[in-house]
Image (tube, coloured by chain):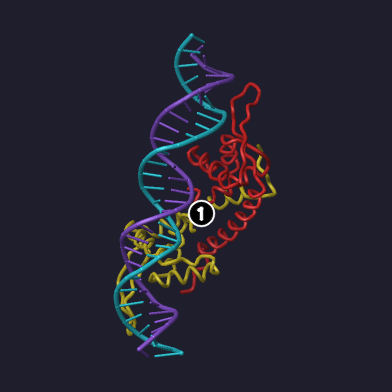
Chain colours: A red, B yellow, C cyan, D purple
Amino acid sequence: MLKGHLDAIVLAALEAGPAHGYAIIESIKRGSASTFDLPEGTVYPALHRLEEAGLLSSAWMTPPGGRRRRLYSLTKAGSAALADRRKAWSRFSQAVDTLLDEDRPWPA
Amino acid sequence: MLKGHLDAIVLAALEAGPAHGYAIIESIKRGSASTFDLPEGTVYPALHRLEEAGLLSSAWMTPPGGRRRRLYSLTKAGSAALADRRKAWSRFSQAVDTLLDEDRPWPA
DNA sequence: CTTCCATACCTAGCGTTACTAGGCATGGAA
DNA sequence: TTCCATGCCTAGTAACGCTAGGTATGGAAG
């Protein structure tokens, strides 16, 4: 369960440059030391959602001697959204960290 | 959006001792510096779910001169679940931190 | 040569989650 | 007496991520 942070992760995966779906999945897996081994049924619909929302753009490519791929790129709106998502994640994770900290039980 | 971590937070709120729903909501709000200002429609069903799952137990109380409240307590299974959730959160948040780190763009 | 695996894309349908939007009731303060 | 904070509840909804399927090609193994 990616819990609503999948979009941020996918956007971040494309920050370094365009990539296609399958490569993004591999990239997320490696980058998270296999913590996130996402099924295609999770990632492809997310890419479609993000493109629909204008945060990504895509183009079909056929590398020489290879198979057709759909290359995704961050749009400007996508970069901006990524920045927002990073801030949201930071806020969110800090709050959860605080609440789960066992050394500081909350006052009644 | 609590994104699947609500259970962990509620369990943690009860670690210091029994509490009733309304107090738990206030407690989470204060403990998170208002980042999580949860509507009752989020928390009450969660408490019911957690009790149904055996992680919490509840008892009706009526404080002198007060109104009836439902006091929730962590069960043993609840404590164990909390420990699991903490580990899961730690793993999860570290992975996301890594993936969102803008100073280390992932290798293709 | 054929069979299998990795690559590469896709979708329909499902279960869970958290939220909106209501409702009910009481105690104390204005 | 009227309002707010307290205190509990639920039905319905939208979104999300997953399962479980489908299609197809290139290269390696047998």
- Front-most of residues B45 and A56: A56
- Front-most of residues C4 and A69: A69
Identify residue for label 1.
B89
For the point 46% across and 72% down, the residue is B26
Chain letter of mark 1 equals: B
What is the three-letter code of the residue carrying label 1? Trp
Residue B69, x across and y down, in percent: 33, 74
Residue B38, above or below C4: below
Residue A15, x across and y down, in percent: 66, 44
In this view, which residue lies farthest toward the right?
Answer: B103
For the point 39% across and 69% down, the residue is B21
Residue A26, x across and y down, in percent: 57, 36
Residue A57 falls in image quadrant: top right
Label 1 Cα crowd, 10 Å radius (few <14 / some 14-19 / many 20+): some
For the point 41% across and 72% down, the residue is B22
Residue A47, x across and y down, in percent: 55, 42
For the point 68% across and 40% down, the residue is A17
Q: Secondary structure at mark 1?
A: helix
Residue C26, above or below B46: below
